[in-house]
Image (cartoon, grey):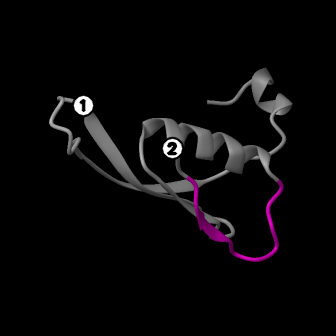
Amino acid sequence: MGGADDRSYRRTELFLVRMRIGEASEGNGQMEWKGKVQRVTDGETHRFDDAQDLVRLLGEMATRQRASSTGSEKIGK
């Protein structure tokens, strides 16, 4: 890693993702992702209900300014 492109990034974020992956309760062969994502540096934590929620949360958390206090909420449909 490293190189000229690294200079264009302002900061690095570190996330911990805990998830359970299993077959959806509808029995339609779809996989279900449930869990939580936590920003390691400040403890901000959110729950997710599927892969799209996880991707959206990571994007939102990475671009949002860090709050001074630890926050926790559920973001879902």
Q: Is residue 27 left or right of residue 37?
A: left
> In whole angstroms, how far apart are the C-alphas of marks 1 and 2?
16 Å
Measuring from the top left, give residue 40's x and y in whole percent: 60, 64
- 71 in the magenta segment: yes
Q: Residue at x 70, y 45 (%)?
A: 60
How far across and down, in percent of the image, does residue 4 sit? 79, 22
Residue at figure coordinates x 42%, y 42% from the top left: 50
Q: Which residues are magenta?
A: 65-75
Q: Position of residue 27 (x, y in %)?
A: 15, 36
At x 68% / y 30%, what residue is drawn? 2
Which circle, 1 or 2, is nearer the viewer?
A: 1
Going by the numbered disc 1, the residue's amino acid type is Gln
Depicted 68 relative to depicted 37: above or below: below
Label 1 vs 2, first from the N-terminus: 1
Specify the label residue 54 is tagged with.
2
Residue at the disc numbered 1: 30
| Residue type at numbered disc 2 | Leu
Quarter assignment of residue 73: bottom right
In the shown orientation, is residue 34 left or right of residue 56? left
Between residue 63 and residue 11, name the one nearer to us: 63
Mark sitting on residue 74: none
Above or below, 23 against 76 in this view is above
- Number of marks: 2
